[in-house]
Amino acid sequence: MRAVSRGKHRDAPRPDSRRGAVCYTFVRPREDRGFAMIEVDHLTKRYGPVTAIQDVSFGVEKGKIVGFLGPNGAGKSTTMKILSCFMPATAGTARVAGFDVFADSLEVRRRIGYLPENAPLYADLPVADYLDFVAEIKGVPRRARRGRVAEVMDRCFIRDMQHRLIGRLSKGYRQRVGLAQALLGDPDVLILDEPTIGLDPKQIAEIRALIRSLAGQHTVILSTHILPEVSMVCDGVIIINRGRIVAQGTETELVEQVFPAARVEVRVAGASGDVAQALRAVPAVLNVELLPSRDGVQGFLVEAARDRDVRSDLASLVLSRGWALKELHQVGMSLEEVFIRVVAGEESPDAAVVAGDALAVEEAPAAPEDR
Amino acid sequence: MRWLPVFKKEMRLYFGSPVAYVVFAFFLLISGWFFSQIFLYYSDISMRSFMQPGMGQNLNITENVMRPLLTNMSVVLLFLLPMVTMRLFAEEKKSGTIELLLTYPVRDGEVMAGKYVAALVLYILLLVLTLLYPGIIAYFTRVEWGPMFTGYLGLVLTGGTFLAVGLLISSLTENQIVAGFGTFGVLLPFWIIGWGSEFAGGTFRSVLQYLSITEHMDTFSRGLIDTKDLVYYLSAIALALFLTLRSLESKRWRG
């Protein structure tokens, strides 16, 4: 299933073809999964001639938090707009809590809380009035309304702003009012388009903790540009690029998929002879790269099969040759490296064409507005 | 009954922003000026009719005060009501709030109903304030309440048609100015189309007359309720609201 090309990016899996099916998308068999709260099946959306998303399929288990990653214009917002029943897809199906977003739109809408990009809110309403309206339209009973509104205001730390007009609030507060309205009605599924954008570091931490606390009870799908956020908050990751899913799974799974080899950095001093050659001879070592030397200490990046820990073998080799072992450690692969590898790997074949495409897709979310 | 939250939200927005107050102040100022001029002129004429016997024969408060007042008011409404409806959908589309509104568990029709009823209630409140004028008349002389009631019914129907057309145009654009002037541009031809009937003949004449908003309003202000006129207004309102629904649906498909 994985096409490994020995080109510019050694070991980087690539799609079979630029336009073809994605090769390292992996969807676990149905029986392995828990109850899928969100099921997306071959979803495609075109805005006239522009294809915003193409053949997107994924599932999210109940109670999980999934991060949606991708460059600008990759199709994150489009997917979320379809899931939130704002617009229908051109082809394919999406189900939330077992209901089809097109056929049973109202049932789906009763079970979701949606925060669109940039949190569009009524600038002329005070915070509390606005949330009261949302609670009412979501069908929170009259008696419970006051309490529920107060509760979400507390959870989102906007209680002290409740009498301010939304238009007078700072971006961070507006974002939190947007999150508060999504939480009203206690929805099973939360669809959050860039929930932490425009917040200061302290607010970001608070909101992340809030989202994290939703796990278990609620199923959350959120999009973000901030990669560490996904590691901190999400159980799973979906990387989307130019309208297609290019990778999905847990962070560890993604790292293993994209970087099949484990990496160990070795720094050796006082070496005589060809160290790289010797290292390469160690069993399970796939490749050795030279790193820039520091203060006369030569560094090597050793790639080895994941199923075997080569560190002790490497250490005993270095010691047996009488070299000085200065450093030996496993190099962890972050999600950021996975993201860059996956997205860049997609775009490298013919950069010019790709750049043009990316632009076209980037315009897509803005284009649909009719005049 | 999920239109109620939308209705309440629209009312909060009307009265939470200067819109309602500006519309009220402007309309009451203009219609008050009309009323005072018409009423002073009427009292002047009736005074003179004392001097010249026979002149007062055709003097009638409904014919000479209420009818011109209501006609003038309906012309002012033609300019004013597009300002009431222009923001209803255009503003939501511009600011993006429509994305949230249309993903709440309410039908598009309920959203539309909430907005239309809010505009209609605002307009009826405005008309209630103008009841001051018949009240002033009643202080001096006898008012014919029957024709006055039908006159106001005619105004409600005319205004209701303006509001429905305004709602439709507002759903077609995200620019409030375009929505306002577009509504005015659509309504004005229906106002002046009746003038052409003077010089047209046969079927064409009756078609032009039937299309004219003035013609139908006039029947009401004379104290008549004709099903022909009711059908005219109610079908125009229904058509505009139906097209608004279609426009919302098409907006969803196009994103």
Image: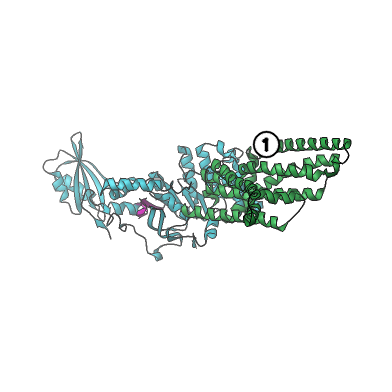
Chain colours: A cyan, B green
Furthest residue in direction left, as rendered: A273
Q: Mark 1 sits on what residue?
A: B26
Answer whether residue A239 is magenta in the image: yes
How many marks on residues? 1
Is B201 rendered above or below residue B188? below
> Would residue A269 be seen by someone viewing this image from the given angle?
yes
Q: Residue at x 33, y 57 (%)?
A: A25
- Residue A273 lies, in percent from the top left, at 11, 42
Q: Which of the two residues, B83 or A313, is positioned nearer the viewer here? A: B83
- Type of secondary structure dominating the magenta stretch: strand
Which type of secondary structure does the marked residue at label 1 adopt? helix
Q: Quadrant of residue A201?
A: top left
Provide the chain ID for the residue under circle 1: B
Along the line of sight, the residue nearer the viewer: A94 or B245: B245
Tell which residue pokes out farthest to the bottom in this image: A31
| Residue A104 pos. (x, y %) | 52, 62
- In this image, A313 relative to A102: left or right? left
x then y, percent, for residue A292: 20, 38
In this picture, residue A206 sits left or right of residue B160: left
Residues drawn in magenta: A234-251
Disc 1: CA contacts within 10 A as few (<14), some (14-19) or many (>=20) = few
Query: x, y (%) of residue B26?
Result: 67, 36
Q: Quadrant of the N terminus of chain B?
A: bottom right
Query: Is residue A293 highlighted in magenta?
Result: no
Q: Is residue B237 visible?
A: no
* Residue placed most toward the observer, B177 or A169: B177
Q: Residue at x 52, y 36 (%)?
A: A170
Q: Is residue B38 above or below residue B251?
A: above
Amino acid beneath label 1: Phe
